[in-house]
Image: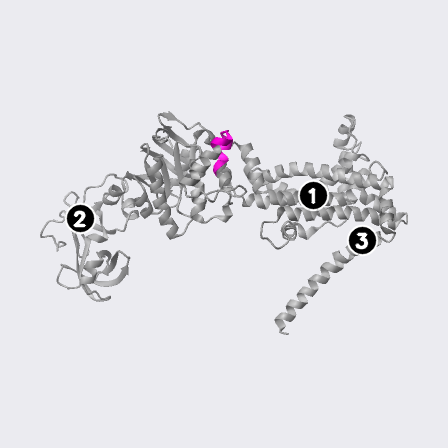
Amino acid sequence: MTLHRLTAYALRSTAVSYVGLLIILPLAAIGHHSLTGGFAGFLKDLQQPQASSAILLTIEAALATTALNAVFGVLSAVVLVRYEFPGRWFLNAMVDLPFAVPTLVAGLMIAALYGPTGLIGAWLQAGGLGVLYERPGIVFAMLFVTMPFTIRALQPVLMELEQDQEEAAFTLGAGPWITFLKVTIPSVLPGLLTGIFLTFVRALGEFGAVVVVAGNIPMKTQVASVYVYGEIESYNPQGATSVSITILLISLLALLLLERLTRPPGERLPTILRRGLMMFPLSHRFMPTK
Amino acid sequence: MTATSNQTKIEVHNLSKRFGSVQAVSRVTFNVRSGELLGLLGPSGSGKTTVLRMLAGLESPTEGDIVVDGRRINDLSVQERNVGFVFQHYALFKHLSVHENVAFGLRIRKWNAEDIRGRVTELLALMSLQDLGGRYPHQLSGGQRQRVAIARALASRPKMLLLDEPFGAVDAKVRQELREWLIRLHHDLNVTSLFVTHDQEEAMEVSDRIIVFSKGRLEQVGTPAEIYEEPATEFVARFIGAMNILEAEVRAGVARIGPFEFPSPASRDGQKVRVGFRPYSVKVSEEPEHFRLQARLRHIYFLGVAYRLEIETADGFVLRSRMNKEEFSRRRFEIGSPVSFAITEFRMLPDAAERGSPPPVPLPPGSPLTP
């Protein structure tokens, strides 16, 4: 065996072991663990009213978060790429903040602003909308931690998009809105889908910010990750794993669907890996430190 | 295609465009005749593309008017102008098929489905793309993409067709095909068309008339022959075709520099003039006494249809001469050997400030330059 082949072998083994030890084996372990009580036991765990309520609530809140961040993320990305205004660089830098701030701290920030005594919270409270320990609080927390995804996924593709395609649409009679919907959005669709799906899966798993803002009220504001934590604390690892594996499966399905949707014909490298890596050109330095 | 709807007359008056502190286009005035194929020619940064974009409504003029068929269109938006625009890199919609690319403008303009299908089929056939309607842009060759771009631009029967460097993005062989294609297409459709190019040969071959731009200014408007034979400015003389240019000083009605003497009766004594002559006006012989002037042959370039000889006089003046194949094969040139030469025709180049060029001066018999 030549040195070159030896190196290649060593590198490959290292990569496989690394991904295996850190991701695949723990996945298998939790999968195995969840089925120790048999499939019936797994289903029974999910049928606990608290558990099913937590799962449904998590999915609903994550969907709401995804929809809001899709709309405002597209808007922010377009503004950051296309418009010159004073302080743009600062706004651009701030987009990465949710990656840099521990999510518990993010929760405290939201609570301070939207709590009943907070600047905006008091005003919302007067209008009848409670945020703290209420369901909207969950969405606020999820919005905060997932904000960078859509923006950062769209920015590079928007910058790459040749503006002459939009101008071509203008010369063919299309106004700015039609052009945006029929030319710009379809052109950046892979980036947009990546941002949307990553927002969704990240929101599904959020713990720190949600627990501070929305608390831990069973059947009301208790999301899946908080429920899992509670079950571990009360010595019910079985129930914890069953809910965990459910959330995990939803995330996995979402990622596989994204992979299908964004794979160009003939592309072999899993796009999700490529895009996932590409998305963190600046933020890899300060990944979330929960 | 109805002939009358395409017969658009365009008048441009004193058109200027400033981007910040950069004056991209300065007070440009010209007319485009209906059904004409007009080339806008100039080096990059000369303002020709900006003029085209102002006609389309993609840029708004800082000053001046654009009048189409007697109507001022400055304030019409790009959407309202109904111009066909072909972008340099085609700007096809990558997520749409060829058929849908061509149909895009018709859908926007709310044509009914049947008319759209008919019109797209007609255009794809006209462009020899009839079998490619279902393909996507990334599955097409450069030449096919450009034809799709032209079909898309023509779909809604625009008043004018504007093409930005239409042959810039394809290789040399395809470029030649596309030129002939464009000429034929224009002949068939007769839609008033303007195209931008930096390639003088391309402009000469394709255009009915050419406008030459330099530094945002209009240098000359004319047919390819007029521009070549009677350049209005030194810039045009240098830019269109090869030209030898010498700077000479006038004494006693003769412009002199080194061994050269050019009769210049209209000039004052002491005046500096620029004398230009095309390579085909430089006759060269391998016999040292055949012509009066002496030089050394520096280089021979084979151009395909002819040869270019580069000669250098004893005082270091380098001139280019063009010789057809027959004559070249009769003579026995050797690089480095002495030659004799003569200049059969020259012109005094106008200063940058003055416009209008005097006709070429045939040399009187007895002049030191005549054979």
Q: Which residue is mark 1?
A: A199
Residues drawn in magenta:
B102-115
In the image, residue B111 lies in the stretch drawn in magenta: yes
Q: Residue at x 72, y 61 (%)?
A: A18
Q: Are marks 2 and 1 on the same chain?
A: no
Quadrant holding the C terminus of chain B: bottom left
Residue A34 can be seen, yes or no: yes
The chain that hosts pointer 2 is: B
Q: What x and y, as percent, mark residue B305?
A: 26, 56
Query: Closer to the observer: label 1 or label 3?
Result: 3
Is residue B313 within the magenta segment? Answer: no
Q: Which residue is mark 3?
A: A31
Which structural element holds mark 1? helix
Q: Helix or strand or loop: what does disc 3 sit on?
A: helix
Between disc 1 and disc 3, whose residue precedes?
A: 3
Q: Position of residue A87 (x, y in %)?
A: 60, 39
Query: Quick check: B287 left or right of B226?
Result: left
Category of crowding for the residue at label 1, using alpha-carbon neighbours closer than 10 angstroms: few (below 14), some (14–19), many (at least 20): many
Question: Residue at point 41% right, 38% down?
Answer: B50
